Image: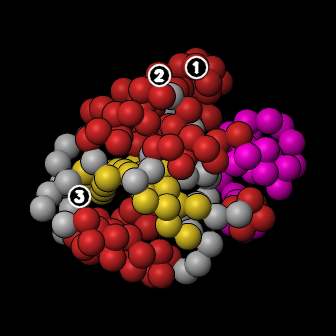
Amino acid sequence: MTQTIFMVGARAAGKTTIGQALANALSYPFVDTDLYMLETTNLTVADVVVTEGWEGFRRRESEALRTVTKPGIVVATGGGMVLSEENRDFMRANGTVFYLSAPAEVLAARLEAYPDAGQRPTLTGRPIVEEVSEVLAARENLYRSAAHHVLDASVAPEAVLVQALELLKKQA
């Protein structure tokens, strides 16, 4: 079975880490939409937001999603990909969507441990714990509505990978 697999979730949920591991396990190629945009435009997320605003970034993000989607690939999406109903519908219709769910405290701790300001501009200007809590609360239902499966991403990446592989096996 060759299907498109989409990873959605908040910043630091592990979409890239788990997505790469899942792609390796399935012998699928892997693409991260944020990295794809960086590689094709030579602009970081922060650069695009500064020059085009969040609206311009979201437009580019949607274009990237459609460009990289093909059978037999794992796609890690940006944390805000689900803000567009069109993107949520597109992913659900064109593949299997995994929501990597983790509490705000876990996500904030990961962001503080591995800061990447050039890649991840602040959305609110608030301290990271507050921002993550606020953004997660606003997006939780969107992640869930996009997802076919919800994975507990607060555990070790290897355990999340096992969850995903078991669900895919049941789905086959």
The three-letter amino acid code for the residue at tag 3 is Pro
Indicate the position of residue 35 as horizontal and vertical percent values. Answer: 43, 45
Q: Which residue is mark 3?
A: 29
Q: Camera-side residue: 64 or 2?
A: 2
Indicate the position of residue 166 as horizontal and vertical percent values. Answer: 33, 76
The residue at 78%/51% (across/down) is: 133
Q: From where the camera sits, is residue 67 visible?
A: yes
Residue 98: which quarter of the image? bottom left
Spatial distance from mark 2 to mark 1, Cα to Cα? Answer: 6 Å
The region drawn magenta spans 109-137
Q: Which mark is residue 69?
A: none
- State yes or no: discs 2 and 1 in contact (Cβ < 8 Å): yes
The three-letter amino acid code for the residue at tag 1 is Glu
Indicate the position of residue 145 as horizontal and vertical percent values. Answer: 50, 43
Q: Which residue is mark 1?
A: 55
Is 81 magenta? The answer is no
